[in-house]
């Protein structure tokens, strides 16, 4: 009888010991998991804060650039804000852009757009959204302008309209060679024609 009681008591003590062991083990594991989560959260917040600091360091307010070639032609571009590309630091993303091309013969080309992308290596600039170009007696509007300083070429595309005192037109693309003063107007598809309206 005593043996049974002793065995029974030993079993109960062993059982409760196991329960206590697993309880504390589970509790400790939960604490470790929670601690790990807190550390990961702090690290994530730290990385995000660092990235935000880098982004803020890459933003330049009231940015402006200028270029002049050997023949005396000048190019000036300014924007309310510029952001340096983190991958390619020779590219600057611009907001509220205004640009001026002053040719040696004193002719002026004025460009404005909501956004732009400027290459500090070769001065090439892409203007996007609400693009307005004033050249000679013409006002050209579009959504996209690719300007190459080296080639003296403006390629204007996407919902292009051109207006002057004599006429207005709609086209897919207008190419302007600012050096030769040549303007090419065309559609992407051969079966479509440039829509021209004369005011005379």
Image (tube, rainbow, N blue to C red):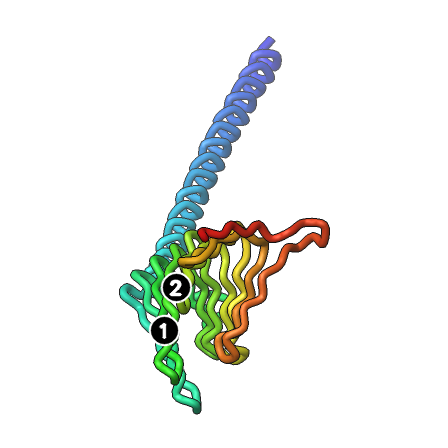
Q: Nearer the viewer, residue 69 or 32?
A: 69
Classify 200 as above or below 68. Answer: above
Residue 158 as seen in the image, left or right of residue 140: right
Classify 107 as above or below 132. Answer: below
> Residue 92: x and y, percent?
42, 67
Instruction: Determine whether the residue tagged by mark 2 lies in a helix, strand or loop.
Output: strand
> Residue 30: x and y, percent?
46, 34
Q: Is residue 142 visible?
A: no
Residue 108 bears which disc, if any?
1
Q: Is residue 136 visible?
A: yes
Residue 143 bears which disc, if any?
none
Residue most extreme to the top: 1
Q: Nearer the viewer, residue 107 or 126?
A: 107
Asked if labels 1 and 2 touch by Cβ distance under 8 angstroms, the answer is yes
Residue sitting at 28 percent across and 64 percent down? 61
- Disc 2: CA contacts within 10 A as few (<14), some (14-19) or many (>=20): some
Classify 136 as above or below 187. Answer: below
Instruction: Determine whether the residue tagged by mark 1 lies in a helix, strand or loop.
Output: strand
Residue most extreme to the bottom: 70
The residue at which mark 2 appears reads as 134
Residue sitting at 56 percent across and 12 percent down? 5
Classify 190 as above or below 29. Answer: below
Residue sitting at 60 percent across and 8 percent down? 1
């Amino acid at each position: 009888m005593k043996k049974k009681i002793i065995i029974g008591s030993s079993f109960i003590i062993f059982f409760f010991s196991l329960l206590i062991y697993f309880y504390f083990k589970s509790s400790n594991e939960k604490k470790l998991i929670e601690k790990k989560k807190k550390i990961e959260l702090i690290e994530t917040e730290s990385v995000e804060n660092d990235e935000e600091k880098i982004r803020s360091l890459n933003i330049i307010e009231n940015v402006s650039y200028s270029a002049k070639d050997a023949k005396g032609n000048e190019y000036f571009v300014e924007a309310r804000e510029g952001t340096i590309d983190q991958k390619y630091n020779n590219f600057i993303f611009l907001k509220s852009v205004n640009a001026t091309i002053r040719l040696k013969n004193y002719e002026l080309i004025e460009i404005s757009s909501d956004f732009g992308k400027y290459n500090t290596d070769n001065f090439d600039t892409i203007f996007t959204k609400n693009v307005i170009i004033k050249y000679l007696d013409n006002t050209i509007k579009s959504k996209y302008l690719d300007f190459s300083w080296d080639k003296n070429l403006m390629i204007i595309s996407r919902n292009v309209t051109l207006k002057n005192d004599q006429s207005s037109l709609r086209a897919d693309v207008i190419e302007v060679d600012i050096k030769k003063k040549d303007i090419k107007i065309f559609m992407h598809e051969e079966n479509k024609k440039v829509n021209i309206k004369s005011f005379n």
